[in-house]
Image (cartoon, rainbow, N blue to C red):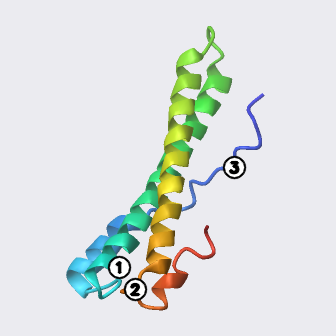
């Protein structure tokens, strides 16, 4: 029986690509370059964490669906993806702290990620 405690987050969408395009074509995002770089990196890291989590979840579900042999390949793959997710979230948190403490960042940007982290 597959685990039920790994929520499906496939309804969440990536934002870093859209954010980069808005910057190129509409001057979107933070006006100050360093602030925008931190903001874009935060989005990229959040997207990476989401992708890694989803891949890890898929590997766990694959392990439970196939049940052929020991399934060690699926377990190792899931472990690597979840490790990547945690690594991305840790870096996300560090970027948020820098952005909130930055003198060059607009006040509204300092609230960026407040609900997520």
Mark 2 packing: few (<14 Cα in 10 Å), some, or many (20+)?
many
3D distance between C-alphas at marks 1 and 2 = 5 Å
Q: Residue at (61%, 67%) from the top-left corner?
A: 117
Rendering quarter of residue 17:
bottom left
Is 44 placed above or below 69 here? below
x and y, in percent, of residue 40 in the image: 36, 70
Cβ–Cβ under 8 Å for marks 1 and 2: yes
| Mark nearer the N terminus (1 vs 3) | 3
35 lies above or below 14: below
| Residue at 51% from the left image edge and 70% from the top image edge | 97
Q: State the quadrant of the N terminus.
A: top right
Query: How far is disc 1 from disc 3 in space, using C-alphas?
Result: 33 Å
Question: In front: mark 1 or mark 3?
Answer: 1
**Drawn side of residue 92 relative to residue 11, left or right:** left
Residues at circles 2 and 3 in contact by the CB criterion of under 8 Å: no
Task: Return the residue found at the far left.
Answer: 24
Q: Is residue 25 left or right of residue 11?
A: left
The residue identified by callout 2 is 105
Query: Which residue position holds label 3?
Result: 7
* Among the two numbered marks 1 and 2 on one chain, the one whose residue lies closer to the N terminus: 1
């Amino acid at each position: 029986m597959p685990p039920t405690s790994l929520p499906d987050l496939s309804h969440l969408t990536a934002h870093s690509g859209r954010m980069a395009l808005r910057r190129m074509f509409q001057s979107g995002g933070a006006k100050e370059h360093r602030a925008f770089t931190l903001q874009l990196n935060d989005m990229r890291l959040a997207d990476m964490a989401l992708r890694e989590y989803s891949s890890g979840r898929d590997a766990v579900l694959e392990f439970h669906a196939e049940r052929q042999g020991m399934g060690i390949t699926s377990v190792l793959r899931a472990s690597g993806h979840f490790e990547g997710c945690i690594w991305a979230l840790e870096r996300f948190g560090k970027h948020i702290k820098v952005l909130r403490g930055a003198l060059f960042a607009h006040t509204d940007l300092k609230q960026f990620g407040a609900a997520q982290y």
